[in-house]
């Protein structure tokens, strides 16, 4: 799976700074916004409006202005620390329920076990993917 050319090339690009300049700039900008609006955030849907006050000059022609390229940062900047805690609690419940269901089934070869395992893997993949872009906001 990892040896597939498209996946391995994409995975290698994670560590190339010049390919991630925009993402790093957005993360820095978002952290600065969070620092100024820690408790309640800037409000849902206000990221783009407030971002222009924080975005420093960049050699990039265009910088994404609609989201931060990270779900945890995006939730925190829009909803504050309390919103982040609720978001993480939701993910905790998803993982907990999935794992409890897997342990209850206890038959790795069973059809239901595979279904729950697939759903749990998909949810975790979606969560991890959200660390590098914001699928909720695209």
Image: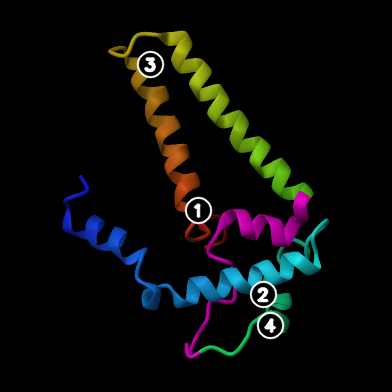
Q: Residue at x 49, y 71 (%)?
A: 23
The residue carrying mark 4 is 52
Residue 39 position, x and y percent, is 83, 56
Q: Residue at x 59, y 37 (%)?
A: 91
Dot placed on the residue nearer the N-terminal end, 3 or 4: 4
The residue carrying mark 3 is 112
CA separation in Å, label 2 and label 1: 18 Å
Left or right of 89 on screen, residue 108: left
Given residues 72 and 111, the one toward you in this image is 72
Closest to the camera, between mark 1 and mark 3, is 1
CA separation in Å, label 1 and label 4: 23 Å
Q: Which residues are magenta?
A: 59-81
Residue 88 position, x and y percent, is 65, 41
Instruction: Tell me, yes or no, whether the two marked residues, 2 and 4, touch with CB atoms within 8 Å.
Output: yes
Dot placed on the residue nearer the N-terminal end, 2 or 1: 2
Residue 28, placed above or below residue 95: below
Q: Which mark is residue 18?
A: none
Q: Residue at x 36, y 65 (%)?
A: 15
Q: Which mark is residue 48?
A: 2
The residue carrying mark 1 is 130
Closest to the camera, between mark 2 and mark 4, is 4
Secondary structure under the numbered disc 3 in the rendered image: helix
Instruction: Tell me, yes or no, whether the two marked residues, 2 and 3, touch with CB atoms within 8 Å.
Output: no
Dot placed on the residue nearer the N-terminal end, 1 or 3: 3
CA separation in Å, label 2 and label 4: 7 Å
CA separation in Å, label 1 and label 3: 27 Å
């Amino acid at each position: 799976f990892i040896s597939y050319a498209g996946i391995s090339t994409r995975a290698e690009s994670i560590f190339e700074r010049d390919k991630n300049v925009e993402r790093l700039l957005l993360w820095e900008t978002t952290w600065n916004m969070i620092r100024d609006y820690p408790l309640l955030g800037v409000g849902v849907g206000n990221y783009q409006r407030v971002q222009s006050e924080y975005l420093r000059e960049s050699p990039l022609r265009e910088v994404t202005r609609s989201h931060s390229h990270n779900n945890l940062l995006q939730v925190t900047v829009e909803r504050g620390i309390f919103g982040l805690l609720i978001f993480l609690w939701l993910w905790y419940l998803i993982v907990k329920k999935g794992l409890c269901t897997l342990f209850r089934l206890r038959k790795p070869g069973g059809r239901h076990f595979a279904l729950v395992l697939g759903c749990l893997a998909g949810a975790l993949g979606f969560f991890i993917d959200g660390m590098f872009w914001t699928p909720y906001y695209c």
